[in-house]
Image (cartoon, rainbow, N blue to C red):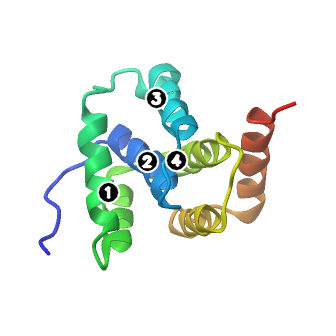
Amino acid sequence: MTEPTISLTPQDALVAVMMATSASDENIRTAELVSIERMVDHMPVFAEYDKDRMLVISNTVFDLFVEEDGLDAFFGLVTEALPEKLYETAYALACDVGASDGLLGEQELRFLAELRYVFRIDRLHAAAIERGARARHQVL
């Protein structure tokens, strides 16, 4: 297939990471989509973001995930668009999406591990981010 010609903004890349986390287990849950929308609506990093781009970004992620080397292309697009100072932010958003439905399956955990590797996130920092996501999404 042809290489994607889309150019991502840093906010697009964050949305792509969140959508990819949700799609990583091949089951996009409503709780995950609501969590993504809530974060885009309320987090300062998305203050100037055009929410109409979310559908285009989501479709790009889904298209990449069906390609043979799509995951590598996904990581290439994201790391090209995302400043390094937002790598931990992207990982934190991914963890929040993963934790939002209370179900972190093996595929989502593998995807998060791949994100840690690609973003070069120290294991101690990753553990703190993961614990924060668990705490925020705890239920009674």
Q: Residues within 10 Å of mark 1 (few under 14, many from 20)?
A: some
Q: Residues within 10 Å of mark 4 (few under 14, many from 20)?
A: many
Q: Which residue is mark 1?
A: 62
Quadrant that contains the C terminus:
top right
- Along the polypeptide, which appears first: circle 3 or circle 4? 3
Q: Judge from the rendering whether residue 49 lies leftward or rightward of residue 113; answer left or right.
A: left
Q: Is residue 137 above or below residue 28?
A: above
Q: Residue at x 34, y 63 (%)?
A: 74
Q: CA distance from mark 3 to mark 4?
A: 15 Å
Q: Are marks 3 and 1 in contact (CB under 8 Å)?
A: no
- Along the polypeptide, which appears first: circle 2 or circle 4? 2
- Along the polypeptide, which appears first: circle 3 or circle 1? 3
Q: Which residue is mark 3?
A: 37
Q: Nearer the viewer, residue 31 or 54?
A: 31
Q: Residue at x 50, y 54 (%)?
A: 27
Residue 91: percent from left, percent from top: 58, 51
